[in-house]
Image (spheres, rainbow, N blue to C red):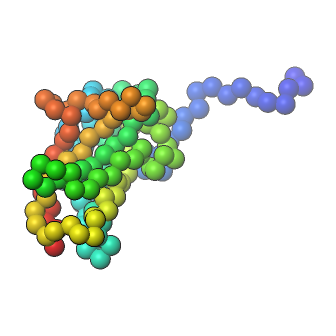
Amino acid sequence: TGLDSVHLTGIRITSPSDQRRLKGGAPAEINVGNVFNLTGYRINYDRTARRITVDLEVGTLEAPIHNYVFFVHLIRDGRIVSQADSEPFYDLFPTSAWWKGERYVFDLKVQLPTNTPAGEYELVGGVYNLPEMQRLPVGNGDTFPLGKIRID
């Protein structure tokens, strides 16, 4: 027709981990704001790097309309000691491009401060939307438990 471009519709963008399952993780069934369903997670503490990696397996209950940020907080005595906040896949595949009914596996890395004392800590996660910074509800709160971890 003499045009130098073509209008494409209905193209589906998928992540590198589309439909993957997290292997060796803890199973979960946590509804996050009726948008996401946390179906599994795995925690790895690298003592040498002083870093905690949290792998999340997340399904979509609805097609997200916002770019959501997932976070993990390392807590001791009710205070946040360290945290990681990131769009999944380090901003390369925003949740607004995700489809309903899909499953995604991605990680968050929590770097420990050099002066972090040894002891038991709690890990919690959650999700908020940008730019409003409003957290999605989880049960009666706005975070989900990821368990305890011993830092030495």
User: Outermost residue, right direction?
Assistant: 2
State the residue at coordinates (29%, 32%): 135
Q: Is residue 32 left or right of residue 105?
A: left
Q: Nearer the viewer, residue 103 or 111?
A: 111
- Across and down, in percent, residue 67 comes to 44, 34
Q: Is residue 115 above or below residue 10?
A: below
Q: Decide if residue 104 is in sight here.
A: yes
* Left or right: residue 124 compared with residue 88: left
- Outermost residue, top direction? 1
Q: Nearer the viewer, residue 12 or 122?
A: 122
Residue found at x 10% / y 62%: 120
The residue under the point 23% across, 29% down is: 137
Q: Which residue shows up at 31% across the image and 46% down it?
A: 71
Q: Nearer the viewer, residue 67 or 1?
A: 67
* Quadrant in which the C terminus appears: bottom left
Foreground residue, 88 or 14?
A: 88
